Amino acid sequence: MSISNYTFTMIKPDAISKGLTSTILKDITDAGFIITALKLTSLTKTEAEKFYSIHQDKPFFDDLVSFMTSGPIVAAILKKENAVEDFRRLLGATNPEKAEEGTLRKKYAESMQRNAIHGSDSDENAIIEAHFHFAEKEIYSFL
Ligand code: UDP
Ligand code: MG
């Protein structure tokens, strides 16, 4: 199994608080992704800072960390051929105003920050992010 068949996603606190968890998971599986790991969890400040460390010098970093620690998240590993690229397409642009019709962020995001869902940007980051959230025994790669 090639690593390019996996990506990592989070349903962010804005979408969870609106009760969108099951709707978004259904959209994801309807698009052909198989869930191989799944949990309702949350990020500590330290964990959020580490997860988004690539953005630590950006002006939005502190607000992003506050937002991502404001409530629970759902973390998942998704399997599909060409998973990273296909999931980014399903996700839509970071800014929901620029997201294409039918994308998850077009449907569920409320702003550039509160944009409902995360998706890994590369195969390498998908593996790093998956292992950030899941122990090996929580990942069901045979699914
Ligand atoms: N973000 C923000 N303001 C910005 C850009 C990004 O609050 O101007 C937040 C937003 O929640 C985004 C996250 O930071 O999803 C990570 O940014 P990135 O550029 O990696 O966007 P993504 O890969 O999530 O589309
Ligand atoms: Mg990103």
Image: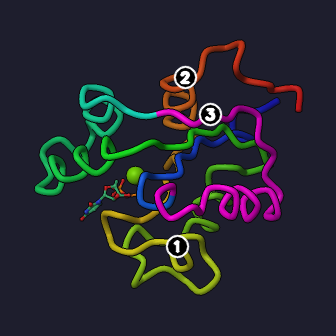
Q: Which residue is mark 2?
A: 131
Q: Which residues are magenta?
A: 16-41
State the image coordinates of residue 72 (x, y, percent, origin top left): 45, 42
Mark 2 surroundings within 10 Å by alpha-carbon count, few (fewer than 14), some (14 through 19), many (20 or more): some
Label located before the other in sequence (1 or 2): 1
Separation (CA) of disc 1 from disc 2: 27 Å
The quadrant in which residue 78 appears is: top right
The quadrant in which the N terminus is found is top right
User: Secondary structure beneath disc 3?
Assistant: strand
Mark 1 surroundings within 10 Å by alpha-carbon count, few (fewer than 14), some (14 through 19), many (20 or more): many
The quadrant in which residue 28 appears is: bottom right
Q: Hey, what amino acid is under mark 3?
A: Lys
Label located before the other in sequence (2 or 3): 3
**Foreground residue among 112 and 67:** 67
Q: Which residue is mark 1?
A: 108
| Residue 71 relative to residue 41: left or right | left
Label located before the other in sequence (3 or 1): 3
**Foreground residue among 6 and 110:** 110
